Amino acid sequence: MKRGICVFSGGSAANNLVDVFETVRRSKECLLSYIIPISDNGGSSSELIRVFGGPGIGDVRSRLVRLIPPSQPESELSAISTLFNHRLSSTSSVDASAEWQLIVSGTSDLWRSISSAKKELIRSFLNLLNLEILKRSRPPSSTFDFTSASVGNLFLTGARLFSGSFESAIYLLGSICGVPDDDVRVIPSINSTFSHHIAAGLANGDVIIGQNSISHPAASTALDNPTIPLQIHHSKNRHSIGHSDHDVEDANLPGSLPTLRTRNIKFSKDEEEDLPARIERIWYINPYGQEMLPPANPRALAAVRNSQAIIYSIGSLYTSIAPSIVVKGMGEALRSTPARHKILILNGSLDREVGPTSQPYSAFDFVDAIARAGEQSRGHSWKPLLHTTRSDDSLKDPLASYSLARDGDLLSPAPKPQSITTNGHVDSVYRHYVTHVIHVTGEGTPHVDHPRLSSVGIDCVKLYGRRSSKGMQYDPQALIGAIEAILGKKGDAMALSRSRRNTMDA
């Protein structure tokens, strides 16, 4: 079977590139696999996690619905896309609940154009979820808040509760949406029916708990909420976090961190404030805040090991990409995959996670973070380089003075990070994870130091994008051309053996 293409991504940002990846897939005539994190605890997902436990499903649902084949506006597939993308009222929990009742009763206008057979199949899982919501209701202290709830997320949760399997629920939603499983697959990075949360360690020693708190300061974090007693104990690189009593009955274990049990339904991505210091790494935590290393989904590992190319899509570095890399087994899979091309599509803007604004991430910092996440998955870690955009000789061997750490114990100094192989290629720890960086230029984009990336064996492809309210955006056709130029045209054996170029302008 022909090796496929494996894309690491989150949800909304990478959805804009779905058509790009589909075009490349068709050109290569292979399977396309999306590896999606399940650590999101913001928005309506936070309410589902609070009441039912389980993984953060928003990004998986978002990608599956985005993959619905194009259809006419009045067609059934178009109506299904509208239904699963629909969000209930964001202004009133009462209005949202009333809207939900119209949907489960089958009288909502959203059912128009959906055949009776599919309508009743979908309704059966929504009504199952509705029954479970009623069973768990404990007024006035604990009731389900439907505000801004995604119908697709509600369906996935109902299907998971019925089948007892997250991947079965994904398969069912994909089948209803008409996503061709032989061509494209959406794979959660962890196959679990339990919640998996992440924490971020900052350079100043602070720890932020939960993905929503890492990405969106509008929600109170475990660090700055004065109502939550928090103690951080450092022991051999592991963090144990104290907690307070909580009087609301929910799906979390008694004594779980309060910051993981709060409603994070409302937050703003438009009013981002700086982190006090750079993020050094992220890790998974159990309900009590202790660091853990969950195993990667075997299907995700198989997709990586059977790939001809790895692509890290645009999206939040530490909450969309890194969570799928730091899981146990993924670092080794990325290093051992036969894929010769590992492409980072650099973001066209800088967000809160790659700051503060006084110390913004460069393209090299993005590569460094991915490599560190992979090595952390393998039981190794190192501190990131100090911020600099210099490309002088002092940076030609950036890891030469690093010491690796496993379980908090310093090992012997790291070996030379790069050496010249017999075929003249540069071998480095970075090149095990990233071989090419595609980027756009313009105000607000990450700085790209071509000589520095070249010194560790990474090629750069510069594209000219267009400005939007969210920063610089890629031109789809230019991006398709850049990816295909790196991978080589179908049947072009010479493209696979051509000599590498340090910089290529497209």
Image (cartoon, rainbow, N blue to C red):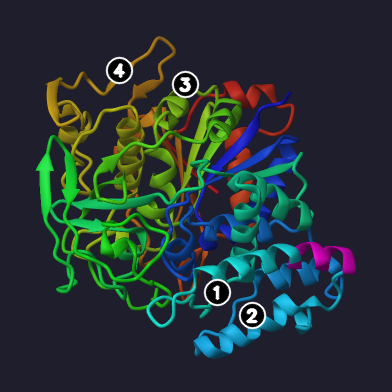
Looking at the rendering, in which quadrant would you find the N terminus? top right
Neighbourhood count class around disc 4 (C-alpha, 10 Å): few under 14, some 14–19, many 20 upward: few
Q: Is residue 171 above or below residue 495?
A: below
What residue is pinned by disc 3? 336
Q: Amino acid at mark 1?
A: Ala
Q: Where is residue 147 drawn, in percent x and y?
A: 51, 80
What residue is pinned by disc 2? 100
Instruction: Please report the residue visible at 68 percent of the width from the left and 55 percent of the height from the top.
Output: 19
- Mark 1 or mark 4, which is nearer to you? 1
Sequence order check, earlier mark of 1 and 4: 1
Contact (Cβ within 8 Å) of mark 1 with mark 3: no
Contact (Cβ within 8 Å) of mark 2 with mark 1: yes
Name the element at disc 3: helix
Sequence order check, earlier mark of 2 and 1: 2
Q: Amino acid at mark 2?
A: Trp
What residue is pinned by disc 4? 419
Q: Amino acid at mark 3?
A: Ser
Q: Which residues are magenta?
A: 116-123
Instruction: Please report the residue visible at 18 percent of the width from the left and 28 percent of the height from the top.
Output: 405
- Mark 4 or mark 3, which is nearer to you? 3
Sequence order check, earlier mark of 4 and 3: 3
Sequence order check, earlier mark of 1 and 3: 1
Instruction: Please report the residue visible at 69 percent of the width from the left and 69 percent of the height from the top.
Output: 127
Dividing the picture into quarters, in which one does residue 103 lie? bottom right
Sequence order check, earlier mark of 2 and 4: 2
